[in-house]
Image (cartoon, helix red, strand yellow):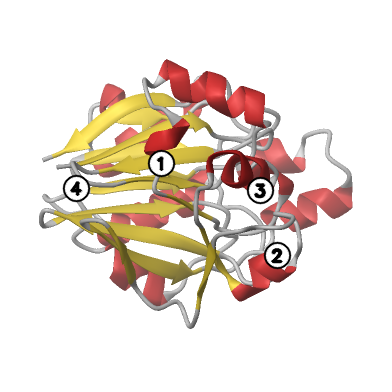
Amino acid sequence: MLKVASLGSGSKGNATLIATDKATVMVDCGFTLKETLKRLERLEVSAHDIDAVLVTHEHQDHISGVGPLSRKFDIPVWSTRGSLLSGKCGKLTQYSIIEGFEAFQIGDLDILPISVPHDAREPCQYLFKASQKRLAILTDLGSYTPEIIDTLKSCHGILLECNHDEEMLWNGPYPYSLKQRVGGPLGHMSNKQAIKLLQSIISDELELLIASHISEQNNCQDLVQKSVAEAISWPQDNVIIAGQDEGFGWYSIS
């Protein structure tokens, strides 16, 4: 069994849990230690049960809590060299460097790092495989490549960035330079981009779809659910939302 839950998703902090019967990993930790433990408790998970923290990139909403959590509970950290060299984790006693986006294993969880276009030193996302099931986390990318499409095909679950509605972004309050960054090829994926990507990889094997990293200023959850569901002919309620405050509870792929 492969399952996923979120402590929260958005520009104020991100952390996702992936678990099997034999392993539990956290992808990113962008919350304070106190807030992380509070959110873990809500999901009935102890920090002592986490086997590793995987870093996607060094932006504060993804990495600010990684160092404190790792040091407090002696949790190993996996990161690309670029993200680690940013120094944003502080001193780590246990860490492994992901070289060349090569696959690795934690317990019974096979993990494939995915190179993504984003304005960070060496960003990546992850594909998880266990019990013949595949779950991908794909956020914080301004565009996608043929390699990303190939990796996502035949996934049973996808946690996918739907960061902004393009019209809301360009008519919204952000400074022009920030609009360019968010909407650019190294920024964040819009609803329209996410839908186009989904339409290119959708299959009967996909059973879990979670929209994540949704902007509170330049998007709305109802719009994401409605537009994504219509585009792939799914019931609207089947498109799960990863919220900033509540994240989402455990979902299983079995």
Query: Which circle's residue, 2 or 4, is located before the other in the chain?
Result: 2
242 to the left or right of 213: left
The residue drawn where x is 55% and y is 65% is: 79
Query: Which circle's residue, 4 or 1, is located before the other in the chain?
Result: 1
The residue drawn where x is 72% and y is 46% is: 60
Q: Amino acid at mark 1?
A: Ile
Q: Please say if the residues under marks 2 and 3 sit with CB atoms less than 8 Å apart.
A: no
Residue 220 position, x and y percent, is 56, 26
Q: Is residue 224 visible?
A: no
Mark 2–mark 1 Cα distance, whole angstroms, equals 28 Å
Q: Dot 4, how many residues are within 10 Å of its Cα: few (below 14), some (14-19), or many (20+)?
A: some
- Residue receiving disc 2: 119
Q: Amino acid at mark 4?
A: Leu
Q: Is residue 47 visible?
A: yes
Quadrant of the rendering where the N terminus is positioned:
top left
Residue 231 position, x and y percent, is 32, 42
Q: Nearer the viewer, mark 2 or mark 3?
A: 3
Q: Nearer the viewer, residue 115 or 184?
A: 115
Residue 150 picture quarter: bottom left
Q: Nearer the viewer, mark 2 or mark 1?
A: 1
Q: Nearer the viewer, residue 232 or 201?
A: 201
Give me the disc on residue 206.
4
Q: Is residue 247 above or below residue 94?
A: above
- Residue receiving disc 1: 50
The residue drawn where x is 51% and y is 26% is: 243
Mark 1–mark 3 Cα distance, whole angstroms, equals 14 Å
In terms of secondary structure, where does tag 3 sit?
helix
- Residue receiving disc 3: 67
Residue 155 position, x and y percent, is 22, 56
